[in-house]
Image (cartoon, rainbow, N blue to C red):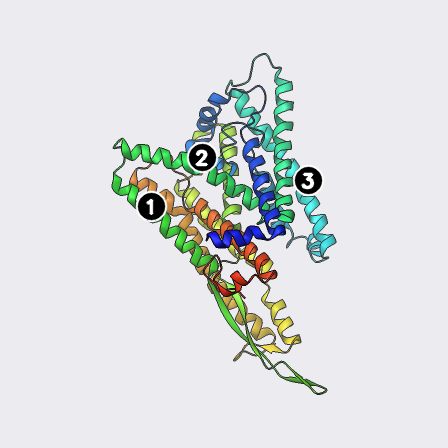
């Protein structure tokens, strides 16, 4: 591993990208501890926890890296950006103009990105106003500051913080390593792990929880990580045969390759999208002050878990429909002289690929849903309180970690490093 790290940092461009990513994430963590002016941060966590409910507050805090309980500049995190991305992902198949923009290449994607940014600003303004109202009603605002001035300062500060995080995410994607928004979410989750593990250890040491459940928690962690790696890397290889064709004195084709179809084509996207959407009902319930509604939408409740599972299945299949088009693949294979052995070219091939992909997605979605709801079941059985970094967070960490490592390997393979070609990659695969 040390040799691989030395090789990794020996590449100047890769070293710059890694250091740039680390620097951006450090800025994110620094901004998470800069509070909005005029707020009593010592009591913000208690007030927000009472308003949102302990489960929902910790659930949101997982995606903001603890910035919410500090009521900091980054209190909203990248949640408004995720929600905006979800909105346009759902609207593109419905509205032909948006679909046409997506198919226009780089220029069309640039316009869609602009629309997503402006939608992010609107959502951030609304969520920042709602958070500010909650804090104001909780009596945490300095009485010497006019209410109107505090509202204006707080809303502008948190909205600007979200926009800045959106910019950081885009810069990491372009100039760093990994997907920027996913890296920010991962950094927030990692930052909360020590405190969560510390509280769990304290419960076990005080006798409130049996040590048996502590061992069980470790086993669950290891099993989830191992399963996530297997599912993330799992794929079905469809054999593709290319027919021979002669052009002059040269013979083309006649070789066999394969088309890989991943078990989990969406990666961590279904989990992130489902989690982001489930925060909206809880926020609405907390603002309206309806306790009966909070019982239904709080994390761990039966309606919450059912909605979580359904959203994960929906976004798994929906995201796959955006990135994997069996009809388009079948058309390209036919034009290039390729075919699946035993399957007729054209529509039968598209139906075959769609059937295989559907079965794989069913397995992937079922695994994601199981891992997402499993921590809530485990905590209710074991009695471990205030532990909300479970399957969802581990899936995000594993998914983002694998994607980042694969990007690093891609940079090394492009430069044909002998140590990578002769040895094994970070994920145990032979490169080259």
Pick the residue in front: 140 or 317: 140
Other-residue count near label 2 (Cα within 10 Å), few / some / many at <14 / 14–19 / ≥20: many
Pick the residue in front: 346 or 1: 1
Disc 3 element: helix
* Residue 218: numbered disc: 1
Other-residue count near label 1 (Cα within 10 Å), few / some / many at <14 / 14–19 / ≥20: few
Going from N to C along the chain, the mark reached first, 3 or 1, is 3
Going from N to C along the chain, the mark reached first, 3 or 2, is 2
What is the C-alpha distance between the residues marked 3 and 2? 28 Å
Other-residue count near label 3 (Cα within 10 Å), few / some / many at <14 / 14–19 / ≥20: some
Front label number (1 vs 2):
1
**What is the x, y in percent for residue 173?**
62, 48
> Quarter of the image holding residue 206?
top left
Taking the image as shown, residue 53 lies to the left or right of residue 212, namely right
- Image point 40% across, 55% down: which residue? 227
Which residue matches tag 3? Answer: 118
Going from N to C along the chain, the mark reached first, 1 or 2, is 2
Q: Is residue 414 visible?
A: yes
Disc 1 element: helix
Q: Quadrant of the C terminus?
A: bottom right
Residue farthest to the top?
Answer: 144
What is the C-alpha distance between the residues marked 3 and 1? 43 Å
> Quarter of the image holding residue 245?
bottom right
Taking the image as shown, residue 63 lies to the left or right of residue 212, namely right
* Residue 58: numbered disc: 2
């Amino acid at each position: 591993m040390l040799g691989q790290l030395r090789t990794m940092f020996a590449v100047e461009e890769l070293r710059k990208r890694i250091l740039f990513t680390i620097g951006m994430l450090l800025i994110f963590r620094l901004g998470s501890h800069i509070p909005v002016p005029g707020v009593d941060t010592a009591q913000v966590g208690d007030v927000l926890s009472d308003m949102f409910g302990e489960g929902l507050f910790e659930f949101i805090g997982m995606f903001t890296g603890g910035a919410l309980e500090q009521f900091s500049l980054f209190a909203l995190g990248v949640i408004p950006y995720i929600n905006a991305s979800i909105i346009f992902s759902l609207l593109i198949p419905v509205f032909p103009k948006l679909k046409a923009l997506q198919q226009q290449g780089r220029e069309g994607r640039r316009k869609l990105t602009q629309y997503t940014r402006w939608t992010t600003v609107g959502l951030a303004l609304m969520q920042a106003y709602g958070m500010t109202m909650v804090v104001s009603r909780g009596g945490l605002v300095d009485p010497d500051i006019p209410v109107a001035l505090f509202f204006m300062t707080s809303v502008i500060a948190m909205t600007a913080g979200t926009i800045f995080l959106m910019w950081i995410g885009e810069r990491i994607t372009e100039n760093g390593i990994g997907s920027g928004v996913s890296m920010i979410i991962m950094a927030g989750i990692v930052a909360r792990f020590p405190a969560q593990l510390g509280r769990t250890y304290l419960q076990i040491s005080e006798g409130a929880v049996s040590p048996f459940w502590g061992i069980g928690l470790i086993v669950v962690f290891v099993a989830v990580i191992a399963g996530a790696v297997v599912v993330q890397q799992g794929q079905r290889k469809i054999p593709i045969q290319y027919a021979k064709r002669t052009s002059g004195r040269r013979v083309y084709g006649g070789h066999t390759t394969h088309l890989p179809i991943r078990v989990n084509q969406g990666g961590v996207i279904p989990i992130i999208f489902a989690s982001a959407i489930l925060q909206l009902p809880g926020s609405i319930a907390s603002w309206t002050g309806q306790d009966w509604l909070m019982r239904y939408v709080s994390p761990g409740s039966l309606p919450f878990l059912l909605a979580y599972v359904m959203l994960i299945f929906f976004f798994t299949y929906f995201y796959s429909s955006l990135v994997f088009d069996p009809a388009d693949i079948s058309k390209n294979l036919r034009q290039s002289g390729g075919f699946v052995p035993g399957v007729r070219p054209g529509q039968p091939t598209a139906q075959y690929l769609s059937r295989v992909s559907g079965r794989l997605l069913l397995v992937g979605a079922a695994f994601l849903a199981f891992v997402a709801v499993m921590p809530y079941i485990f905590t209710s059985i074991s009695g471990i309180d205030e532990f909300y970094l479970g399957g969802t967070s581990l899936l995000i960490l594993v998914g983002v970690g694998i994607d980042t490592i694969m990007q690093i390997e891609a940079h090394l393979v492009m430069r044909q490093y002998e140590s990578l070609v002769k040895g094994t990659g970070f994920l145990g695969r032979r490169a080259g």
